[in-house]
Amino acid sequence: MVIVSGHLRVDPQRRAAYLATCAPVVELARGTSGCLDFALSADLVDEGRINILERWESQGAVDAFRGEGVGDDQSSMILGAKVSEYDTAAERKLS
């Protein structure tokens, strides 16, 4: 399993607009083979931060979905990013 986790930085005034452009991407990802979960969300305490959490069956599934990356419209709104991929060997369910 691959976990993608981190955050994006956007202008606080444009965060809602950025997230609105992401709704089709989230829907597409969740319908993609190999996607276990895909979420982008507004941070509760930092108005310029968008949290990212993705879970994928494999690196191949991540790569197939990611393709060229974000489009120019979204890219122009991103001021910074800190996102990493993690390979995991096991899962422990907490609930």
Image (cartoon, rainbow, N blue to C red):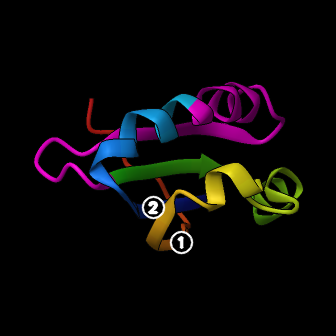
Going by the numbered disc 2, the residue's amino acid type is Ser
Q: Secondary structure at mark 1?
A: strand
The answer to whether residue 88 is above or below residue 66 is below
Please tell me which residue is depicted at 36% across the width and 51% down the height of the picture. Answer: 51
Quarter of the picture containing the C terminus is: top left
Residue 12 left/right relative to 77: left
Can you tell which of label 1 and label 2 is closer to the viewer?
A: 2
- Is residue 44 rendered magenta in the image? yes
Which region shows up in magenta?
Answer: 21-49
Measured as percent of width and height from the top left, residue 53 is found at 46, 50
Residue at horizontal 50 percent and vertical 41 percent from the top: 18
Tell me the residue that label 2 is attached to.
5
Q: N-terminal of the two: label 1 or label 2?
A: 2
Give the amino acid type for the residue marked by disc 1 in the picture.
Answer: Tyr
> Measuring 57% from the left and 37% from the top, which residue is drawn there?
37
User: Where does the image place residue 81, in percent across and percent down from the top left?
Assistant: 46, 72
Query: Which of the labelled discs sits on residue 86, or is there none?
Result: 1
Q: Is residue 18 magenta?
A: no
Q: Nearer the viewer, residue 53 or 93?
A: 53
Q: At numbered mark 2, what does the secondary structure look like: helix, strand or loop? A: strand
The reply to whether dot 1 and dot 2 touch (C-beta < 8 Å) is yes
Residue at 54% in and 49% down: 54
